[in-house]
Image (cartoon, rainbow, N blue to C red):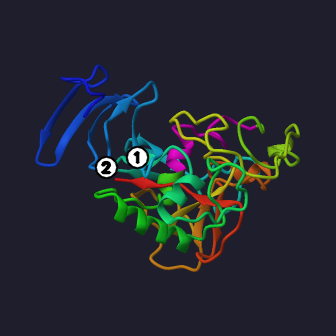
Amino acid sequence: MLNTEPNNPTWASASGRDSKGLWVEFEQLGNTCRVYLPKWAGKLEHDKIGLFTDLSIKGVIQRCRWIPPGIFCMGSPTSEKERHDNEIQHQVTLSQGFWLADTVCTQALWKAVMGDNPAFFTENENNPVEQVSWDDVRNFIKQLNMLTSGLGAQLPTEAQWEYACRAGTTTPFSFGETITPDQVNYDGNIPYANGKKGRCREKTVAVKSLPANPWGLYEMHGNVWEWCADWYDDFFEMPIIDPIGSDTGSSRVLRGGSWSNHGWRTRSANRGWYAPVNRDNYIGFRLVVG
């Protein structure tokens, strides 16, 4: 179960079984985390970043990272350059950890589940699947959950997404105060905050082509926008626990920016929105599982 080691793996402080199943305890971000082995996981592994496991669908592997519970400031401070008024900063508590795909869904994974490939940029099956609407993604998730017992796949909430994107940082980007095209796939002709101009690829790149953030998540900034579960709505200043967004709306949240966007659009706090039936070659998604 745990790296095939007979007793506690070297990275774990304890392991055992209770009414909820097999579990392991380990240190992450200065806290002791207890994580239960998901039914869909082959084994739990650990590296210098934290806990991870692999989901296998018809031979296609999607790595998933354990994102621990925590408290963070969602939105942007008024001092952040090129911020927008819909990014009101407020404290968010995420009381439960979650498994998050370390990349957006690839064309290979989409094809394994759905049997087709709706993407525009098809030169590499490891490129993000794009041209998928929020409704398309909902159908994909339904099929994926039918293929894998106990998977419980869904889209991340907007709060989960920003928490994971920031990876403990408070700067405009998880990489710091600014970015370059070597870190993020965006329109380098329009850099952030009048920075130095750079490359504009004008297309998606294969997942894991660019550096991961501090929590081992790839291309959270740029490449493709990522659908979130929430209806788009205003933020408020009061602290909130485990937000899931409004019950109704006309647009679903998009996060992260894309290959076609100016630098400011790829900030951790930037918010986008789109009707759930719309598709474009700069919109994809990332999964939360288990």
Q: Quadrant of residue 29?
A: top left
Where is residue 26? Give x, y as percent: 30, 29
Residue 157, percent across and down? 47, 60
Q: Are marks 1 and 2 in contact (CB under 8 Å)?
A: yes
Queried whether the magenta region covers residue 175, the answer comes back as yes
Marked residue nearer the N-terminal end (1 or 2) = 2
Q: Is residue 124 above or below residue 33?
A: below
From the image, which quarter does the N terminus lie in? top left
Residue at 17% in and 45% down: 21
Q: Can the viewer see residue 249 in this picture?
A: yes
> Residue most toward the left?
19
Place of residue 5 in the rendered image (x, y in percent of width and height, measured from the top left): 24, 23
Neighbour class for label 2 at 10 Å: few (<14), some, many (≥20)? some
Left or right of 155 in this view: 8: left
Q: Which mark is residue 55?
A: 1
Query: Could you say which is closer to the camera, residue 17 or residue 245?
Result: 17
Give the SS element for disc 1. Answer: strand
Type of the residue with mark 2: Trp
Q: Decide: is 48 above or below 124.
A: above
Residue 90 in view? no
Q: Foreground: 245 or 226?
A: 226
Q: Which residue is mark 2?
A: 40
Please determine whether, in this image, residue 234 is positioned above or below residue 105.
below
Residue at left 51%, top 37%?
Answer: 168
State the image coordinates of residue 67 (x, y, percent, origin top left): 42, 42
Query: In the rendered structure, which amino acid carries the disc numbered 1?
Result: Leu
Where disc 2 sits, the SS reads loop
| Magenta region, residue range | 162-179
Q: Tell me which residue sits at (80%, 45%) in the image.
A: 192
